[in-house]
Amino acid sequence: MTKLSITTLILLLLVAGASGCTAGSGDDAQLAVVVDTDMGIDDVRALIFLLESGEVDIRAVTVAGTGIAQCPEAAISAAALLRTFDRADIPVACGLEVPLEGYNTAPTTWRHEATLLAGMDLDRSGLADTIGEADVLLRETLSENDGLIILALGPLTNIAPVLSDRDLADAVSEVRLMGGAVEVGGNVVSFTNFTAEFNIWIDPTAARQVLESGVPVSIIPLDATNSVPISPATMDVLATSTTRASELLRGFYDANPLQGGVFHWDDLAAATLVDPTLVEFEEMPIAITTDQQSDELGRTTRVASGEGIVARVAMSADRDRFERLFFQTVTGSEATTRDAWIPDATVTFDGARCAYDGPDPPPPDLALEIVNNSATPPLPTQTSSIWILRDLPSDVSISCAITLSDVHELAGVRLPN
């Protein structure tokens, strides 16, 4: 019998459009973009993709201090990354370190690890004094550039206050954000909140204000990013390339081995600027739960016509086409990974029970695919999540835990609370 800890399995299950307006003249003009980021590794992948694509003109980078990495260190890393790609001319700034309302934050260990970007060979020397204030930089950039797109890859703490200025909001053609979970479960690690996505959950009040700003909003939620998992095959593609982009990413993953439940979150959002047909957009009215006492704080919900705010929402993504574009841009060669990786074992969940197909007992390092076929939210629906479980003990069993009080087991023995 194979059994994993209840914490691990809860994590396994929880984790488990038209182009923007073009600034400038001519059909071939680059998209003018401000990138607002919290500098997690998926943000770094997104920035690298944009810097290498040649399709986007980044006018400024602002860092949300409320997100996964901490300011000013995260902003210094952003400036170092820009300098690595010969774009030291792009200004970088740090923003607020607390949400507009509430106190949600990532676990301290997550923030520490994300801030380090260990293994990524970045020269941060001499950059501390170049970091500005996000509010000032955003206002200046929007004042000087009409028709900009804001690509928001973290919590929206920096963006919401600026868009409350009507003149500045009118200068923005679109906010394209990675965030939310509409018809799938969330990815906040919590025993009570199964519905919220991290970026929205950190500062749901800011997210609601952005929706209400009057600026057109396009959302790339987990509904789409769940289609583009990262697997060991992703690492294999990076390993075959010697571009500066792939070497930077490979250095990070060498120092931080792939664990699992990881997707191309922010890089998918960035790639839709280059090719909006990578995702299927739907227009729908969206509401965000901002009640700080709610177990669904940060939930993004499709509501009835006439309620909420209408946004374009990407409800699916084309994995093969995205990977070809991403790898062509980052490594110089097209690749797809759908059929390039075979897991050691598979756990399938239908909402009521688990089915385990794999070695018994499992090897100490188990490459596992979680296939979630549960029928209804708040659990993720029709989601495939890839996990690399390391240093497993010899006496374990696989179970699917929904909450501490609601456990569906393969072994038929209730796990202790």
Image (cartoon, helix red, strand yellow):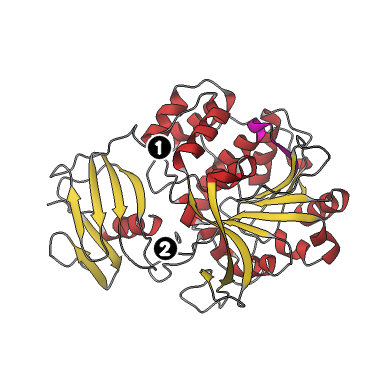
Instruction: Work out whether mark 1 precedes mark 2 in sequence or the reverse, and give the earlier one.
Output: 2
Circle 1 residue: 257
Is 271 in the magenta? Answer: no
* Viewer-nearest residue: 233 or 38: 233
Q: Quadrant of the C terminus?
A: bottom left
Q: Is residue 110 left or right of residue 356?
A: right
Amino acid type of the residue that numbered disc 1 sits on in the rendered structure: Pro
Residue 376 showing in the rendered view:
yes
Which circle marks residue 295 in the picture? none
Is residue 393 shown above or below 311? Answer: above
Q: Which residue is found at the position 16% from the left and 51% from the top?
A: 2
Q: Is residue 4 left or right of residue 76?
A: left
Q: Which residue is found at the position 75% from the left and 33% from the top?
A: 88
Give coordinates of residue 357: x percent, y percent. Answer: 18, 47
Amino acid type of the residue that numbered disc 2 sits on in the rendered structure: Gly
Is residue 392 shown above or below 194? Answer: above
Query: What segment is highlighted magenta in the picture?
Result: 51-61
Circle 2 residue: 185
Q: CA distance from mark 1 to mark 2?
A: 25 Å
